[in-house]
Image (tube, rainbow, N blue to C red):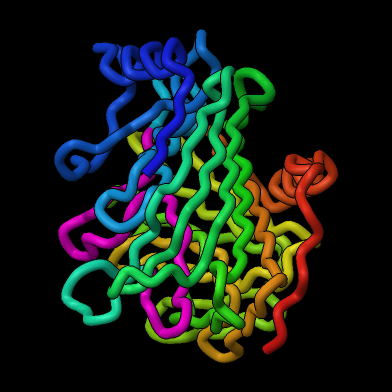
């Protein structure tokens, strides 16, 4: 594994992570995580990046809503679902499950082949190898994440831009992408959100109930909001119109709170042939304060027009 970091930056980031006034993480993380704070060098972290496969994948371990005392949002490896890791991206590839981790015969692993933090400390790029249980490489992924802050006071927003490009590994004629109805880019919220969070969508036309309060809803964006310690907090997830498939927003509020940009791979798997690629782009906005649908729609439109990753290669749509 090759791990490349700018060493002065790495030292500064680790110092930030260990500072006594750093905001709390929420749930305790498993032992020996390789955490890197992401954000402006002179400000509190917007996110915490789990840079290595821990145990089977890298991910965003924590997100913070803005404020004088930034509010942690995510749960990492909770007792009821230890494979839920903050904000994570996973699918099934050739019947290897990259979402689950233990207790199954076909668990896969996202191995970090190369990792590079930005000089400003506001993001990273990674090369990942999606390995089957026997070590066979099925997919290669190029991942880019950036964070930023906008606005002040009541208008303050913390942003995270996510991009993943998937290609079949060298020597593979094709890879079949599939998975459960919630597979995709998903986040597990802290226990304080359970049983009381409210979901909002850009539209509810076509919404279906999967089981219990689990829903799948097509649309440009979805959000979840809750009052935490007397403070309103909202998390908005935004789909990019150039994605090879539009998001089906998976939402679940009981007995825990989860939101993911699913891709309908449970009903319509996709075949990605050699030389083809899937590039998936999503935006997240973390807001402290009330956020009505009109405000969320405005933020979503701003993100889509900002073109956070303008230099990516075009996506080759995979055939069902």
Q: Give the x, y percent position of residue 164.
A: 60, 55
Q: Is any part of residue 58 visible from this angle? A: yes
Query: Relative to residue 242, is residue 303 depicted above or below?
Result: above
Give the residue drawn at x 40%, y 20%: 69
Q: Residue furthest front?
A: 171
Please identify the dominant SS of the magenta region.
loop
* Observer-nearest of 99 and 7: 7
* Residue at x 38% of width, y 39% of height: 51
Which residue occupies 59% across, 43% down?
144
- Front residue of 275 and 279: 275
Q: Residue at x 74, y 43 (%)?
A: 309
Q: Which residues are magenta?
A: 72-98
Left or right for 286, reference 165: left
Q: Quadrant of residue 110?
A: bottom left
Q: Nearer the viewer, residue 124 or 29?
A: 124
Q: Quadrant of residue 92?
A: bottom left
One can see residue 68 in this view: no
Give above or below for 197 relative to 148: below
Determine whether 69 is above or below 204 in the image. Answer: above
The image shows residue 210 at horizontal and vertical percentages of: 47, 86
In the figure, 138 relative to 47: above or below?
below
Q: How many numbered marks are there? A: 0
Is 277 included in the stretch rendered in magenta?
no
């Amino acid at each position: 594994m090759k791990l490349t970091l700018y060493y002065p930056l790495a030292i500064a980031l680790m110092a930030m992570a260990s500072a006594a006034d750093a905001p709390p993480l929420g749930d305790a993380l498993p032992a020996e995580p390789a955490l890197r704070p992401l954000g402006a060098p002179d400000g509190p972290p917007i996110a915490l990046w789990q840079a290595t496969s821990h145990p089977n994948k890298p991910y965003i371990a924590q997100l913070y809503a803005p404020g004088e005392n930034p509010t942690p949002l995510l749960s990492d490896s909770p007792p009821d679902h230890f494979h839920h890791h903050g904000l994570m991206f996973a699918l099934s590839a050739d019947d290897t499950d990259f979402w689950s981790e233990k207790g199954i015969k076909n668990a896969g692993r996202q191995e970090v082949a190369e990792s590079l933090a930005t000089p400003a400390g506001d993001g990273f790029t990674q090369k990942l190898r999606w390995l089957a249980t026997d070590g066979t490489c099925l997919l290669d992924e190029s991942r880019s994440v950036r964070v930023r802050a906008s606005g002040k006071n009541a208008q303050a927003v913390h942003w995270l831009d996510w991009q993943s490009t998937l290609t079949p590994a060298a020597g593979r004629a094709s890879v079949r992408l599939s998975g459960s109805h919630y597979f995709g880019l998903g986040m597990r919220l802290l226990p304080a959100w359970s049983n009381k969070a409210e979901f909002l969508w850009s539209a509810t036309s076509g919404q279906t109930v999967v089981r219990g309060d689990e829903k799948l809803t097509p649309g440009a964006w979805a959000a979840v909001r809750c009052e935490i310690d007397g403070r309103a907090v909202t998390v908005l997830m935004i789909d990019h119109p150039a994605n090879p498939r539009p998001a089906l927003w998976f939402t679940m509020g009981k007995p825990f709170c989860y939101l993911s940009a699913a891709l309908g791979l449970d009903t319509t798997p996709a075949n990605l042939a050699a030389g083809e690629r899937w590039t998936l782009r999503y935006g997240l906005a973390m807001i402290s304060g009330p956020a009505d649908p009109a405000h969320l729609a405005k933020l979503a439109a701003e993100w889509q027009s900002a073109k956070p990753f303008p230099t990516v290669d075009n996506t080759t749509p995979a055939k069902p």
